[in-house]
Image: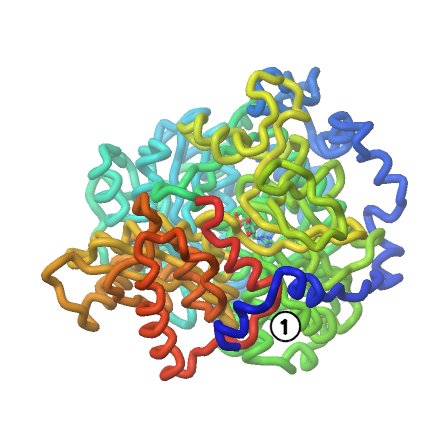
Amino acid sequence: MSSENEAQVSEAEIAVHWREEAYIPPPPRFVAQANAADPSIFERFGEKNFPECFREYADLLTWDRYWHTTLDTSSAPFWKWFVGGRLNASYNCVDRHLAKHRNKAAFIWVPEPEAEDTQVITYQELHKRVNEFAAVLRDFCGLKAGDRVTFHLPMVPELPISMLACARLGVVHSEVFGGFSGAACGDRVADSGSHVLITIDGYYRNGELLDHKVKADEAIATAQSKGQEIDRVLVWRRHPGAYSSQTPMVHGRDFFVDELLADRRGTVVDPVSMPAEAPLFLMYTSGTTAQPKGCQHSTGGYLAYVAGTSKYYQDIHVEDTYWCFADIGWITGHSYIVYGPLALAATSVIYEGVPTYPDPGRPWRIAERLGVNIFHTAPTTIRMLRKLGPDEPRKYDYHFKHMTTVGEPIEPEVWGWYYGVVGKGEAVIVDTWWQTENGGFLGSTLPALQPMKPGSCGPGVLGIYPVIYDEMGNAVPPGSERAGNMCIRNPWPGIFQTIWGQPERFVQIYYEKYCRDRNSTDWHDWPYFSGDGALLAADGYFRILGRVDDVINVAGHRLGTKELESASVTVEEVAEAAAVPVMDEMRGRAVEIYIALKPGYAADAGVEDKVAAAIETLIGKIARPKHVWVVPDMPKTRSGKIMRRVIAGISNFTAVGDITTLANPEIVETIRHHVQAEKVDRGEVPRELSPQEMEEIKAFGQAE
Ligand code: WTA
């Protein structure tokens, strides 16, 4: 579609194009066994029972001391849940299951090399390993409740073991996604004030044993440059006894965990009874500034929320084999591979590698062999498996009762393949919408009780009351076909407590926009602003459009435009940079970077490569831009602000919108000509975008 044509499509026409998909009911076999099959549950979680309705989730846990106040709003919007209660997360995920489920698999770990044996870790063995490692953390590292520890670990069982060992001591873990660069890890080490870094020598990815320890040395250098010293680096070994990294171990600083554990065989560490309000972990995520923010999650509220949503929305029963194909380095893995499932004594599968290694039949072989019946993944993975092996699922004898999609909007055609081919028409699907900040699901259908509608996540989940506000703070009525800002009216137990070390930004980013009275201690005055655009259909189902702030969702990974831009301007020649999302068939969105050079520098291919390399070093491979465009100048407002929305329109061949307020409107045509001609030459003209996607591009950067 040419941009001229597109520019003529009016808002009203867009509305006409919205197509509501038909409902699909859950399979009767699913309904017959579902944890939530009685519609009275909606009443139990109705607004008139708020906040006491969340007792039902908290009662799934074992408390050392029961709480006296379910929700304390006295320091709004810093909500406190289950105040007065005490518990230990490691005890709840491990010890308490020993009596009944000692010999049941807690984790089944599937290494990427197919010839390597699958490891089954029973609750008994998990208990031993968590205790022994907790002893290392306490006695060798001197860690105690409240200290922070950074992990930079891939998808190996040592990651949840490390998490649960910290939780046992009340130590706050901060896992950095294994695919992030050493520098990105070092930033997070410094921000969290960690003195201990836990890493691994190497791991398998796409058939290759990657050197991972090398990133620890980079992380330490970065942390040091920000004034944070690491005293100890604990190095797990992918093959205990053999070192798989080229990087030397630093004497007195780096230690092999398998050697430290040898002296602690059988040590038992009592779980430390923590206040419900004590932080359990930090999870860094990208936002509107260059510095990622550490979302601080609580022990009691968080664990209750992930246990409750795992029970009702993931429909986990003890006898199920549950496989969430996310990375534990992201919130989905924390909540729905480790804490939620283990709180319910589930069997949770962990896979080390990439979905298509050595071929796109791999996930289905794993599902067949292990009898996986609950499957959980992201649209990016579904798109990739569909493209590379559309018929593969039919070749394997597995049967899912339940499937999840999370992290990005899913196109109805992709949804259809997931349902019909992957799920063989036998599984219910939940499209779960939520964020790192939220702890657990916020929008989804309750699988046995609410029909599916492809492309919509569904209504708010139990005890969550969402609303779409326009810029003025008026609620957009259902069925109006007007997009607005997705907000949640009420607090919930899984909400993060604050941004680590930056309480004022916590208030400013998430609550200031729609707060009715800053002095109020009534939660009704403090709606939560999610940063997503959405539409609300007449039936109460939400359709998430994407971010309205400076965040780009690449393959389900959140990248901040400011982070990308500040990495780009570390390149000597670059004066200014702007990052925008571009539609991508596989990854949902990809990143394009526009750069303007400093005077005296000429554009050549070299500078584009340097920018891509800088991004890879400072953030990680996942952030590598699809294109770097060198432009003579950026479109700017008269106050000098770069108009990313205009650039995003150019990259996506959509309307650039109103440019009359620009200081340099003529530059738009120059850039458009250059970029679009080049894209046409390379055969990269995007397919016709859906009205939903056009809406997203239009909204991009709107919150600037
Ligand atoms: C997007 C991941 C559409 C959204 C759990 C959100 C989704 C961001 C969905 C959070 C969904 C998440 N449909 N979009 N079902 N789920 N998103 O923090 O833009 O990594 O704000 O948390 O992903 O990403 P995060």
On the picture, is 691 further left or further right than 216? Answer: right
In the depicted view, which residue is nearer to us: 647 or 629?
Answer: 647
Residue 364, quarter of the rendered image = bottom right
| Figure check: 486 above or below 490 | below
| Figure check: 89 above or below 31 | above
On the image, the x and y values in percent for residue 382 come to: 59, 69
**Disc 1 marks which amino acid?**
Trp
In the depicted view, which residue is nearer to us: 364 or 674?
Answer: 674
What residue did someone put label 1 on? 364
On the image, the x and y values in percent for residue 663 come to: 31, 52
In the depicted view, which residue is nearer to us: 50 or 216?
Answer: 50
On the image, the x and y values in percent for residue 27 come to: 85, 63
Q: Residue at x 43, y 51 (%)?
A: 177
Residue 140, quarter of the rendered image = top left
On the image, the x and y values in percent for residue 571 come to: 19, 56
Mark 1 burial class by Cα count in 10 Å: few <14, some 14-19, many 20+: many
Q: Residue at x 59, y 64 (%)?
A: 379
Q: Residue at x 77, y 65 (%)?
A: 427
* Residue, far left: 600
Q: Quadrant of the C terminus?
A: top left
Camera sees residue 167: no
Q: Secondary structure at mark 1?
A: helix
Colour scheme of the rendered structure:
rainbow
